[in-house]
Image (tube, rainbow, N blue to C red):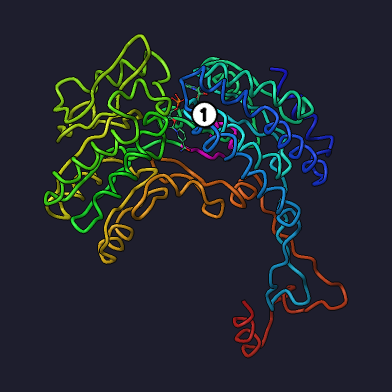
């Protein structure tokens, strides 16, 4: 394959070692995204009727915010960082050098097809790597605009796009890379990890999961419902960090259901298909998959679909069986199961049934309950009394743990994951302690002293 060689040769030219060169490229990217923002909105609308507001907030402006943080700080982050020395090496000065890995393969999914290409790309370029991007084949209009933007902004060996589906992705994965950054399903993440292991290539895996949303009996119900509905039905539920299911205390279950219904109606009207603010399912296959999940379920609200439009209305499901398809894996669509609990053991039975999720949300006005849940469960990130917004703070690394992924990025964390951290000690020559050299015939007193040097 020609592409990785081109990127490798470009990396070998040392051009990307110059931070000013990287900065100039990122500034061109910033300018181009601003210039093409309307086209990006149109592309995402053509792909799955993504509302313009959602594209601005979660795709273009999201990437522009990432660019802003990176452009402001990358020079500083790229400098060797002085760390304190240890007495045993005296006299020395010690540093952390951050160097680019080399050539990065970046594979993206379809659900936030613009953001999930450009947010990691900004980090990879800022850290000085050359990059090959493989966007999702399921959002072809966005894939095309990504290709156009990259071709206009970057020299071909610096960043280039390879469009295509699973086969293209497989061909790319056979190659040797210096780093692989993958966003997608846990199943494909395992394939990527296996391919990377063959060459001992380091990876970041941004995967999915079954994200619980716990609502205890002290929660502010109306606000809780509003915030759950917003985070769940944004992008028609096709968000990796959306609540997958609700665990609600039995005492407040009925009130929460009523509040959820009202919030859905307030947001999308009586017919969400007619709302400009509600996206579609990405394709027929995923639409059919979601409809199958609803078979045999007790639908409390919604459940309306239209095959001609890949439309599925915001849907609430009551108490699904744990072994039903709806509860087997990640839903990744606008279906929200609601399950009552009475004891903390009930919560545990559900959460422990799945691998570590990408996100967990806790709605409670009780600090002790919030703390208990945070301390007890391991997950990528989350919120107390809100959903999804943990992704927006560039100071919080974003990523999963265990089954939901490996490694976190955004802001400084992005710069760091795309950099190899080299520890360097610069030793002075004016003094050379004789003790470390053989023969090691030292008096006991000195041996004792040495133990305190480390
Ligand atoms: P996917 O895993 O099917 O595809 C992701 C990418 O991998 C695509 O570019 C695709 O072409 C490629 N691919 C698919 N099958 C492959 C194979 N067998 N071998 C090699 N490459 C292959 O995921 P998707 O359907 O595009 O996206 C949805 C998933 O992504 C969900 O599970 C969601 O939770 C997850 N996701 C995670 C994050 C995150 O940040 N953690 C963000 C968005 C989506």
Q: Quadrant of residue 402?
A: top left
Is 367 located above or below residue 160 in the figure?
Answer: below
Residue 379, image x and y in percent? 37, 49
Give coordinates of residue 276: x percent, y percent.
Answer: 43, 25
Q: Quadrant of the N terminus?
A: top right
* Quarter where residue 290 is shown: top left
Identify the residue position indicated by label 1 in the image: 52
**Would residue 204 be found to the left or right of residue 31 on screen?**
left
Disc 1 element:
helix
Above or below 294: residue 396: below
Please state the horizontal and vertical placement of residue 11, each as a whole percent of the image. 78, 35
- Residue at 44% across / 36% down in the picture? 207
Measuring 21% from the left and 45% from the top, which residue is drawn there? 247
Whole-percent x, y for residue 81 in the image: 72, 62
| Bounds of the magenta segment | 196-206
Q: Is residue 79 magenta?
A: no
């Amino acid at each position: 394959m020609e592409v990785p060689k081109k990127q490798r040769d470009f990396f070998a030219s040392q051009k990307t070692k110059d931070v000013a060169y990287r900065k100039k490229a990122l500034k061109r990217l910033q300018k181009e995204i601003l210039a093409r923002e309307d086209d990006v909105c149109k592309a995402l609308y053509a792909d799955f009727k993504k509302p313009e507001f959602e594209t601005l907030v979660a795709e273009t402006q999201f990437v522009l915010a990432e660019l802003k943080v990176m452009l402001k700080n990358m020079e500083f982050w790229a400098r060797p960082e002085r760390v304190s020395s240890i007495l045993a090496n005296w006299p020395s000065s010690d540093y952390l050098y951050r160097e680019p890995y080399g050539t990065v393969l970046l594979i993206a999914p379809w659900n936030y097809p613009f953001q999930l290409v450009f947010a990691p790309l900004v980090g990879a370029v800022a850290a000085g790597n050359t990059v090959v991007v493989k966007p999702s084949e399921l959002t072809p209009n966005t894939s095309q605009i990504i290709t156009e933007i990259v071709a206009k902004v970057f020299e071909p060996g610096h960043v280039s796009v390879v469009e295509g589906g699973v086969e293209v992705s497989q061909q790319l994965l056979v190659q040797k890379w210096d780093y692989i950054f993958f966003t997608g399903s846990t199943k494909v993440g395992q394939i990527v990890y296996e391919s990377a292991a063959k060459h001992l290539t380091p990876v970041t895996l941004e995967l999915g999961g079954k994200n619980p949303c716990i609502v205890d009996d002290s929660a502010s119900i109306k606000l809780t419902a509003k915030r759950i509905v917003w985070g769940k039905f944004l992008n028609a539920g096709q968000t990796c960090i959306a609540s997958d299911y609700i665990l609600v205390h039995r005492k407040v279950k009925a009130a929460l259901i009523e509040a959820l219904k009202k919030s859905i109606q307030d947001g999308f009207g009586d017919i969400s298909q007619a709302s400009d603010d509600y996206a579609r399912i990405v394709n027929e296959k995923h639409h059919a998959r979601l409809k199958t999940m609803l078979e045999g379920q007790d639908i409390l609200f919604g459940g309306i679909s239209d095959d001609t439009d890949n439309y599925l209305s915001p849907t609430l499901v009551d108490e699904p069986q744990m072994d039903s398809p709806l509860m087997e894996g990640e839903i990744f669509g606008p279906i929200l199961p609601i399950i009552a609990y009475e004891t903390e053991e009930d919560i545990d039975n559900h959460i422990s049934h799945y691998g570590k999720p990408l996100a967990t949300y806790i709605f409670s006005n009780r600090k002790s309950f919030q703390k208990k849940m945070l301390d007890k469960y391991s997950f990528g990130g989350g919120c107390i009394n809100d959903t999804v917004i943990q992704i927006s703070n560039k100071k919080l690394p974003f990523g999963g743990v265990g089954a939901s992924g490996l490694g976190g990025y955004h802001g400084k964390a992005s710069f760091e994951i795309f950099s190899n951290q080299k520890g360097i000690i610069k030793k002075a020559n004016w003094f050379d302690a004789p003790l470390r050299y053989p023969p090691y015939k030292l008096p006991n007193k000195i041996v004792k002293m040495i133990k305190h040097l480390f």
